[in-house]
Amino acid sequence: MKEKFTTLTSTMMPIEVENVDTDQIIPARFLKATTRDGFGKNLFYDWRYTQHGSPIPSFAMNNSCFSGAKVLLSGKNFGCGSSREHAAWAIFGAGYRAVISSFFADIFKNNAINNGLLPVQVSPEFLSKAFSEVKKDPKTPIVISLEEQTVSLPSVRLAEHFEINPYKKECMINGYDDIDYLIAMRGEIQQYENDRMK
């Protein structure tokens, strides 16, 4: 079982960069582990730290104004590049529960959902407005309702609908992975088998 995702109200961590690839999300040299533990500390490592390991003050993740954010806000074409699942592990491991962009690479999108991280694809206009509001006030909240498939900026009364595969939606709402889903359906599966035996 994974964490259930129904409604999330959070501030946002702005990464105003387009074409963020998986090697930028989690550099290849950190891919030695085979479990998902510990990747969060190396999220965006080469953007967060100098080659000597000192935090780069200009990077948003090093700014205390954005601490506590559970939503990552990024430019279009997020998660492009390699198919490494570690990218989703790193984002989730760093405490984020959703990523908002105007476009996601398909493989990243599937990896994210399979690991309890919700990719929310919005219009370029909504994305631009979200970045604008965060620049004005780092504590600007965003509300994501998975049940209603809506994302909204209450401060400017702006909302949009987003798409998600119905099966994956049900899994995220209930905290299921594929095996959990089958186990939850075992009564119906057994009934189907019993009916076939008649």
Image (cartoon, rainbow, N blue to C red):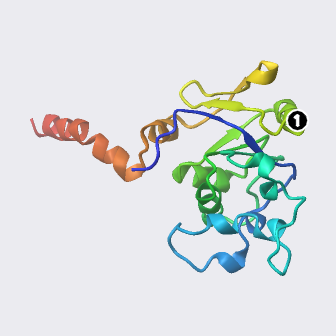
Q: Residue at x 87, y 52 (%)?
A: 18
Against 31, residue 19 (above or below) is above
Quadrant housing residue 197: top left
- What residue did someone put label 1 on? 128
Pick the front one: 97 or 58: 58
Name the spot of residue 107 as percent of width and height, x first: 65, 56
Residue at the extreme front of the image, as rendered = 64
Pick the front one: 151 or 58: 58
The amino acid pointed to by label 1 is Ser
Residue 68 can be seen in this image: yes
Name the spot of residue 56 as percent of width and height, x first: 87, 66
Against 154, residue 86 (above or below) is below
Q: Is residue 156 left or right of residue 150?
A: right
Q: Is residue 143 left or right of residue 124?
A: left
Name the spot of residue 84 as percent of width and height, x first: 64, 66
Name the spot of residue 100 as percent of width and height, x first: 73, 42
Classed neighbour count for the residue bearing mark 1: other residues with Cα under 10 Å, few (<14), some (14–19), many (≥20) = some
Q: Residue at x 32, y 46 (%)?
A: 182
Q: Secondary structure at mark 1?
A: helix
Residue 84 can be seen in this image: no
Pick the front one: 174 or 182: 174
Count numbered badges in the picture: 1
Give the position of the C terminus as an image quadrant: top left
Quadrant housing residue 190: top left
Pick the front one: 33 or 105: 33
Against 180, residue 195 (above or below) is above
Q: Is residue 178 left or right of residue 90?
A: left
